[in-house]
Image (cartoon, rainbow, N blue to C red):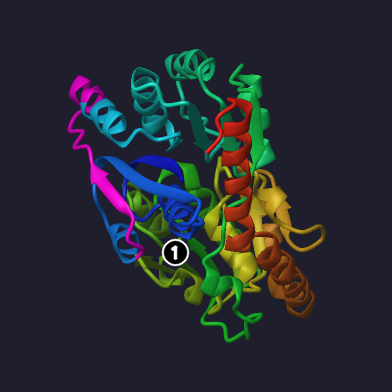
Amino acid sequence: MIRIVHLIATLDRGGAETQLVRIATALNRSRFAPTVLCLRRPGPLEEPLKASGIDYRIIGQHYKVSRMAFFHLRKELCALRPHILHTWLFTSHFYGRLAGIAARVPVLVIGERCVDLWKTPLHWWLDRRLARRTDAIVANAQTTLDFLQTKGVTAPVMRVIPNALDPMLSAAPVRAVAPEWDFFAAGRLHEQKDYPTLLRALAEVRKTRPGATLAIAGDGPERRALESLAGRLRVASNVTFLGLREDVPALMTRARCFVMSSRYEGSSNSLLEALATGTPVVTTDAGGSAELIPEGCGNIVPVKNPARLAEGMRWTLEHPEEARERAGRASGTVRERHALASVVRQHENLYEELLQRKGIQI
C-alpha cells in the first residue's frame, strides 16, 4: 500500500482545498492510503474527508512563522511514515518540504496552483532553494510551470494535471438558458480578482445597454470598497453582491454570461465550472485561463482593460445564439477533459512513476 500525505494550510472552501479533497477521496484505496494534514485550522471540507473515511489531522499552526508547527509536522510525518508527501500552496510547500526532508520522506511533490504575482524576492529565493530537494512540481496549467521556470524554480519532474470537476457537474447536461442576470462573477472579493475593472466594464456596457445587470458571488476584504465604487460609477442598482454561496454552478445557469476579470490565476475553478455548465464566458487572459477554453469557445481579453472586457461582455448580449452555441461546444469538451476519474488516474500514475524513479517497490 502506498502511503500518501496531502498537506495544506486550511480546510476552508477554496480552489486548491477543494481539488485536494476531490483527489484524496477518489484515490484507489486498494493501492493508495491517503492522510490529510492541515497546518492551521479545520473547515467545511472536513465533511467529505470524514464521509470517505480519510484520516485527517490538524497541526495547529498559530503564527505565520512557527518553529512549533515545523516540529509538530515532523512528528506526524515520522509517525505516518509516508512514501509520498504532496503539499498544496506556498505555506505548505515551505513547512512541508522542511519537515519532509527532516522526516526522510522518500518523495516530495508540490502542487503549484497559480501564477503568484504576490511573491517577494524572499519567497522566490526559498522556492529555488527548496526546489533542489523536490521530486516533482505539479501545476494545473502550463502557464504556471512556464512562469516558475522564469523564476528558476524547477524539479526533475514538471507535470501539468488539470483541475477536476465535481462529478455531479461533470455528468450534468448542457444548461438551459433562463437568465436572471446578464452577467455573473464568482470568487473572493480580493485584489487578485480585480473586480474594479469588472465594475468599470459594466459601466461601459450600460452606455448602450442601460439595463445590464451583474451578480457577484463571494466575500472578502474589498467588499465595502467595491460597493462604494459601484455607487460612484452609478451602477449600484445594477449590481447584486450575493455574498458567500454554496450553489455557484447553479447560479451560473441563471446568467447570460460568466465574467472573470482576474489579474492573475492558475486554472480557475469558477471559470471551469462556467464552461462545464454551458454558460458563455468572457475572461481575462490571466494565468492559464486561455488553456481552459476550447478554441473559439469564449472571449479572452487582456487584464486590467475595462474597455476590452466591456467589448466582450457586450458581444454576448448582442449575439446570444452564437454565444450559446460556443458555450455548448465548450461544455462537452471540458466535462470530458476534467472528469474526476481521469484527473485522479493522472495523479496515481505520477505517484507510481516517482516511486519507480527512486527505486522504491511497493
Mark 1 neighbour density, 10 Å: few (under 14) some (14–19) many (20 or more): many
> Which quadrant of the figure has residue 64?
top left
Residue at (60% x, 44% y) in the render: 140
Magenta span covers which residues? 52-71
> Which quadrant of the figure has residue 239?
bottom left
| Nearer to the camera, 147 or 199 | 147
| Nearer to the camera, 192 or 121 | 121
Q: Is residue 86 visible?
A: yes
From the viewer's perspective, is residue 149 above or below residue 5? above
Task: State the image coordinates of residue 211 (x, y, percent, origin top left).
Answer: 55, 76
Secondary structure of residue under mark 1: strand
> Which quadrant of the figure has residue 191?
top left
Which residue is disc 1 drawn over? 216
Callout 1, which amino acid?
A: Ile
Taking 39 as reference, is 145 left or right? right
Task: State the image coordinates of residue 98 (x, y, percent, origin top left).
Answer: 37, 20
Taking 323 as reference, is 6 left or right? left
| Nearer to the camera, 338 or 249 | 338
Residue at (35% x, 33% y) in the render: 81
Q: Is residue 209 magenta?
A: no
Taking 248 as reference, is 37 left or right? left
Q: Is residue 213 visible?
A: no
